[in-house]
Image (cartoon, rainbow, N blue to C red):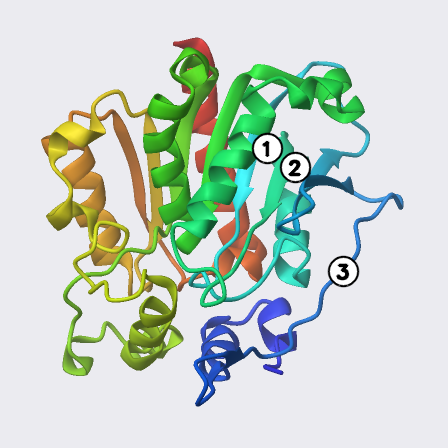
């Protein structure tokens, strides 16, 4: 297992995350062996936030881990549906650093976070993760969430946001697209999409074009491996799941909620993220707020408190503007 202790202490997390990615082994029969990364149970202990798991689809093994600030404020909280990263292949809402990240988010924003444990590729290739994301959004917007005691007591179902990090940002985008078709009457409750370091592909830079030595966080060979495991069988990197700016007509973006696109200068995905934000705004007519000049590398917010605080501040600013609209 990759050593994440240095990253957790505040150093650059790139080597640790890169080491985890490199440990994915594709076996001769097409199955994969994943690196072991610690999982943690939900917590009701005293802390900045408490958490509990809520089943979503028992037949698929999906669930939502809810995070509530501790103590919860008197005022009702916005609800953030969160999709974790990992290239569609790794991690869980129970993964130690995503669990801690959602605890910090719930307390700092503040908000009620619903972090989705979705099905992973290659056992469940795309669009399986998108289907799970749509089911989670339906749980929140379709009435089931009203029966949950935390949502009923502390959540404002008229102020929902769909957020994702890395491949989760990709998922949040496609969840926004599906919402208009699956539940147009509920679409207004989603005040915005929060797309942090969204993971898209298409043509890649050559190694000589790498931004820095820390670009090894997401090496080209690991990026190729992740997409080959996640995309539908036979699909290439210009499939709309991977490269929507090329494969998708701008008309498909009509009615998409307001978007926040965030990223870091040291992230090898930053150029794609900026290109994606421009496409949303200039070709699709989507209202887009960009915050792509922060320091740090990919996933730095999971390990470096300063990077997390910057992200949470951008979220608060975006959400406050949406609430005042």
Q: Position of residue 272 (x, y in %)?
A: 22, 55
Residue 319 place in picture, x, y as percent: 46, 24
Is disc 1 in contact with disc 2, using a CB cutoff of under 8 Å? yes
- Closer to the N terminus: mark 3 or mark 1? 3
Would you call the spot at circle 3 few (<14 residues within 10 Å), some (14-19), or many (20 or more)? few
Quarter location, residue 258? top left
Judging by the rendered image, the residue that carries numbered circle 3 is 40
Residue at the bottom extreme, as displayed: 28
The answer to whether residue 56 is left or right of residue 150 is left
Residues 111 and 88: in front is 88
Residue depth check, mark 3 versus mark 1: number of the one nearer the observer: 3
Q: In the image, what residue occupies the spot 62% across and 83% down? A: 1
- Can residue 137 be seen in this snapshot? yes
Mark 2 or mark 3, which is nearer to you? 3
Q: Residue at x 46, y 50 (%)?
A: 129
Residue 171: give x, y in percent of width and height.
40, 45
Give coordinates of residue 298: x percent, y percent: 41, 62
Q: Residue at x 16, y 72 (%)?
A: 205
| Neighbourhood count class around disc 2 (C-alpha, 10 Å): few under 14, some 14–19, many 20 upward | many
Regarding mark 1 in the picture, which secondary structure is present there?
Answer: loop
- Mark 3 secondary-structure assignment: loop
Residue matched to label 2: 106
The residue indicated by pointer 1 is: 109
Q: CA distance from mark 1 to mark 2?
A: 6 Å
Q: Quadrant of the C terminus?
A: top left
Numbered circles on residues, count: 3
Point 36% across, 77% down: residue: 222
**What is the C-alpha distance between the residues marked 3 and 1?**
22 Å
Q: Earlier in the sequence, mark 2 or mark 3?
A: 3
Q: CA distance from mark 2 to mark 3?
A: 17 Å
Q: Which mark is residue 125?
A: none
């Amino acid at each position: 297992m990759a050593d994440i202790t240095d990253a957790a202490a505040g150093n650059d997390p790139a080597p640790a995350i890169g080491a985890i990615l490199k440990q994915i082994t594709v076996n001769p029969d097409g199955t994969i062996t994943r690196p072991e990364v610690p999982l943690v149970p939900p917590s009701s202990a005293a802390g900045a936030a408490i958490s509990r798991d809520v089943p979503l689809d028992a037949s698929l093994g999906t669930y939502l881990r809810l995070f509530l600030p501790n103590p919860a404020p008197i005022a009702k909280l916005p609800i953030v549906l969160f999709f974790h990263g990992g290239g569609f292949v790794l991690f869980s809402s129970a993964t130690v650093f995503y669990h801690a990240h959602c605890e910090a988010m719930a307390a700092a924003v503040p908000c009620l976070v619903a972090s989705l444990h979705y099905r992973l590729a290659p056992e469940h290739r795309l669009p399986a993760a998108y289907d799970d994301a749509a089911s989670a959004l339906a749980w929140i917007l379709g009435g089931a969430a009203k029966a949950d005691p935390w949502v009923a007591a502390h959540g404002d179902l008229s102020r929902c946001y769909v957020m994702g990090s890395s491949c989760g940002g990709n998922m949040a985008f496609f969840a926004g697209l599906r919402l208009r078709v699956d539940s147009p009457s509920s679409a207004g409750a989603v005040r915005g999409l929060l797309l942090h370091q969204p993971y898209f592909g298409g043509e890649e830079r050559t190694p000589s074009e790498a931004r820095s030595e820390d670009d090894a966080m997401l090496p080209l060979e690991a990026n190729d491996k992740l997409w080959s495991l996640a995309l539908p069988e036979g699909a290439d990197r210009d499939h709309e799941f991977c490269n929507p700016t090329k494969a998708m007509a701008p008309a498909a973006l009509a009615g998409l909620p307001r978007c926040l696109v965030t990223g870091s200068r040291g992230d090898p995905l930053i150029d794609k993220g900026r290109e994606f934000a421009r496409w949303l705004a200039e070709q699709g007519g989507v209202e887009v707020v960009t915050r792509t000049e922060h320091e740090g590398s990919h996933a730095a917010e999971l390990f470096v408190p300063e990077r997390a605080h910057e992200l949470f501040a951008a979220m608060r600013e975006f959400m406050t503007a949406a609430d005042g609209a």
